[in-house]
Amino acid sequence: MNDGLEQLQPARRETLSDQVHEALCEMLLSGALKPRDRLSLRDLAERLDVSMMPVREAVSRLAASGALNVSPKRAVQVPLMTAGEFADLTEVRMLNEGEAARRAALAATEAEIAGILRLAEQFERVLDRSYGSAEAVAANKDLHFALYRASGSAALMQVIRMLWLKAGPIINYDIGVRAGVPAEEGLTRSRTHHSREHHRQLCQALQAHDGAAAAHAIAEDIRVASEMIRAHAADEMDEGRRRILI
């Protein structure tokens, strides 16, 4: 018998710490945790209805990857970024998410494409109904991740998920910059929002199995969103501070 196989341990079932980690990841991916949010470990434990230990373990894993910061007083916060850090994140997202879109256009099944088209329509409905809401941010995330899963690349999905753990809390500034504006203004912003056209271009590219067009649509969606986010951040920059509030 192979000695190496004898040393293998039974596979671990998902622990409570794993479940908490996944819940926190979802909060970051969907923008439920925002850059200004500051929570204690106890706050998180109460929100997730678990003890402190699994929260501490899950937060430590996310802090090690740079998705969360933990202060000496055990306060948990989404990291702020410099303009240069955000530009770097945007460029890497454009490259990786554009490649995933290209692969999806070439490899996705008709059922996968139909599902992505339905999510694109759902996103527009949510944008009209709840511009600037967490629901709109989550609908955008669902659309993008359905596209990236359709690429068929587990490696790309892993990379993109890590990028979104950092980008997710920021995206809410694009899908509803200055949420809380008057209803008429919000409706105007919703109807003219850049993501509508980019998502429609993406859907057309998927139906035509045009990889280059799909990659371009997603890259432009990310690029324009980043410009809007940076403009919003510049409006709220503290005097003498080098880190932008995103």
Image: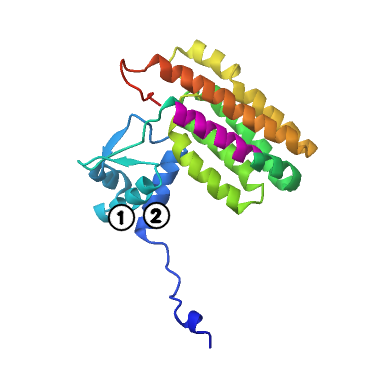
Crowding around mark 1 (Cα neighbors within 10 Å: few <14, some 14 to 19, many 20+) is some
Quarter assignment of residue 117: top right
As rendered, which of 177 and 231 lies closer to the eye?
A: 231
Q: Secondary structure at mark 1?
A: helix
Q: Looking at the picture, how far across and down is residue 143, in whole percent?
A: 59, 37
Q: Give the magenta range.
A: 84-98
The secondary structure making up most of the magenta span is helix
Residue sitting at the far right: 208
Residue 179 in view in this figure = no
Query: Residue 233: within the magenta?
Result: no
SS label for mark 2: helix
**In the rendered structure, which disc, 1 or 2, sits on the residue that comes first in sequence?**
2
User: Is 3 situated above or below 183?
Assistant: below
Q: Hey, what amino acid is under mark 1?
A: Pro
Res. 107 visible in picture: yes
Query: Marks 1 and 2: CB-CB under 8 Å?
Result: yes
Disc 1 versus disc 2: distance between alpha carbons? 9 Å
The numbered dot on residue 92 is none
Residue drawn 36% across and 35% down? 79
Numbered-mark total: 2
Is residue 38 found left or right of 222 in the rendered image?
left
Q: Is residue 12 above or below residue 94?
A: below
> Residue at 66% of width from left, 51% of height from top?
152
Q: Which residue is mark 2?
A: 19
Where on the picture, by quarter, is residue 192?
A: top right
Residue 6 coordinates in the image, percent (x, y): 47, 83
Residue drawn at point x = 28 percent, y = 34 percent: 38
- Identify residue type, mark 2: Gln
